[in-house]
Structures are given as structure tokens and as C-alpha cells.
Image (cartoon, helix red, strand yellow):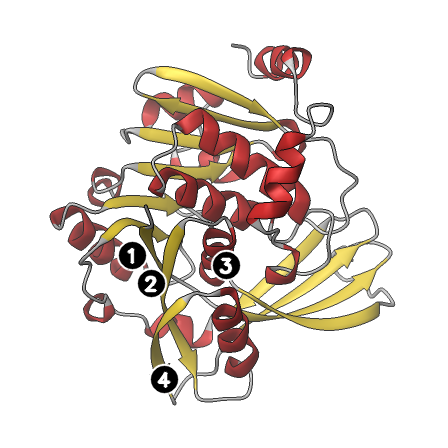
Amino acid sequence: MSSTVLVAGSANLDFVVRAAHVPAPGETVLGRGFQTFPGGKGANQAVACTRAGGADTRMLLALGADDFARPIEASLADAGVRLHIVRDAQLPTGTAFICLSDDAENAITVAPGANMALRPAHLPPLDGVQWLLLQLETPLPTVLAHAQAARAAGVRVALNAAPAQPLPAELLAALDLLIVNEGELDVVAGHPPDLASGLARLDVPCVIVTLGARGCLARSEGRILLQPAFAIAPVDTTAAGDTFCGTLVASLARGHALPQALLAASAASALACTRLGAQSSIPSHTEVAALLADAARVPGADAHAALAAWCAL
């Protein structure tokens, strides 16, 4: 049975340049291989959600009336995302400027532009929506209003708290699922001394912390779940987190249990790291299924033990 996920959030055009290393403050480096890619956390997550299969994916986004909007719209439409576009002729479409190093690290500066025009009243009807997926590249009052409206309508709410900022208690109270990386957990939980303390400070039914090349952990219903990462040779990690979030929520919307959703999200995120670009790197359901069917590549008991030891669990 198909389920519906609504993603409300950002869409940017990414300007990506390859370089030997990310420049330090005040340093100029000679880049190479400049390309543009459709991106933005919200749009990336919407593409990941629809490519995960089994979830009808919609997206609420704000774009400028400019040429930068065209490749973003085309990429989302080609992926099968149904669009609710707010058009703002006074603001440019959001952009992101990314330096990608040869070791797959990156430095990103976002000019949000029209993303800041997204308002509470823009939320479309939620009839038939199972999950609302949000991020923090749009105004925080809008994110809060959308989360509260969804909660009142009986829709489950997931927030990827990125870019990180302190969150009001009212927003945390409206969430069913919070997804953060280690740095975001530090900010959102008020600089806890360790992972366990950070998780304990967040009054959200389910909190997932992504740990980069180590994997991820989840606290749900009083228990801790661990999912080690898949071993890959990274090329570009730009959309890895967004791929994880979109795939995870799509899996949950299809009724999968959290351990199964974490495994699928981790596999999709790993595959995304092996390709250049944001939406262009996000794998299909078939590709993820093929990786999961390869028993030699699925993390085993030793990987789980190593992750548990690192997390001090």
C-alpha cells in the first residue's frame, strides 16, 4: 500500500568546485571541475524519499522567478516528486557554494534566498499524509507552525535539525522523530558531555544520531539501536545525510520497523557517498536492495560490537 510523505523545506542550486583540499581562512586554492547540481536539504530529502520506493512524495518549497529555479524543478519532477511551489519574484532561488576536496570532505556556504519566503500559511492540505519531514533551512517560525499543524492533524512529524540551532520546547513537543549528526546533537541538546547525556536531554519519542563513517544510533521507546555504516570508498559526502533522512522516513511510512528503516537508510547513504553531486548521487530502491542482498557487504556482528564500544554502550 502506498503511503504519502510531505517534505516541507529548502531547495537550492549547488555550485560545486573540486579542489585538492578545502581552503583554510584567508587561503586561495586553485579549483577544477566546476559543475552545478540541484540541491538543498529539503529537495534532496524529497528525492531520496521518492527513490526509496513505496512512498508517494510531495514537496512544499519556495523558489525565485529566475533561471536557477528551472533545474531544481526539473530534477524534482523527474524523480516523481509532486510539487507545491511558492514563487517569490522578489528573492532569488536559493544557492549553495560547495568546495569538494579530493578526500571527499566539503565546505558549504548557503545563500537561502527564496527559501526564507516559506510561511506557515503555505502548508498544503494534509489529507492522506502519513509523515511530514522538515529541516532548518527555512524560517524557524514556519518550521514550528508546520510541525504543530501536522501534529494537530494526526500526521507524524520528523525533523532533521540541520543546520543546527537551539530549538524551542514547543517544536520538540511536536516531533515524533528527530534526526541529528554529532555536531547538531551538541547544539540542539545544549552541549552535553557525551552521546548518552545528549539523548537523555531530548524529550522526543525517537532520536537518531548519525555518526558518519561509524554508522548511527537511535533511542526509541527506551531502547538503543545501533546500525554500523557500510564500508565504501567516498567520493562526495554532500547529500549523504539527506539521503539517510529521506530513505528512513519513506521506509517508516511504508510501515517498516525502525531497525529495517535504519538499515535501508544506511545503505542508501553509503551509495550516495560514492557519487558526485547531491540529488544526482541518490540511489534508487533497486540499487539499495542489491546492496542489502550482498551479505558480504552488510555490516555484521563485529561491526555492531565495534560501534557499541565506541558509543560506550
Question: Which label is found at residue 77?
Answer: none
Residues under labels 2 and 1: Cα distance? Answer: 6 Å
Q: Check whether the beta carbons of the residues at disc 1 and disc 3 lie within 8 A of each other.
A: no
Location of mark 1 (residue): 143
Crowding at dot 1, Cα within 10 Å, few <14 / some 14-19 / many 20+, comes out as many
Look at mark 2 in the image and give the residue it sits on.
139
Which percent across, then down, holds residue 171? 24, 45
- The answer to whether the residues at label 2 and label 4 have Cβ atoms under 8 Å apart is no
Quarter of the figure with the N terminus: top left
Q: Amino acid at mark 4?
A: Asp
Is 25 displayed left or right of 3 in the figure? Answer: right
Which residue is farthest left? 152
User: Residue at point 52% right, 43% down?
Assistant: 244
**Real-space CA distance between mark 4 and mark 1, rounded to the nearest whole angstrom:** 18 Å
Which residue type carries mark 1? Val
Secondary structure beneath label 4: strand
Q: Residue 62: name its quadrant.
A: bottom left
Q: Are marks 2 and 1 in contact (CB under 8 Å)?
A: yes
Can residue 42 be seen here? The reply is: yes
The nearer-to-camera label among 1 and 3 is 3
Q: CA distance from mark 2 to mark 3?
A: 22 Å
Amino acid residing under circle 3: Val
Q: Nearer the viewer, mark 2 or mark 3?
A: 3
In the displayed structure, does residue 257 sit left or right of residue 157?
right
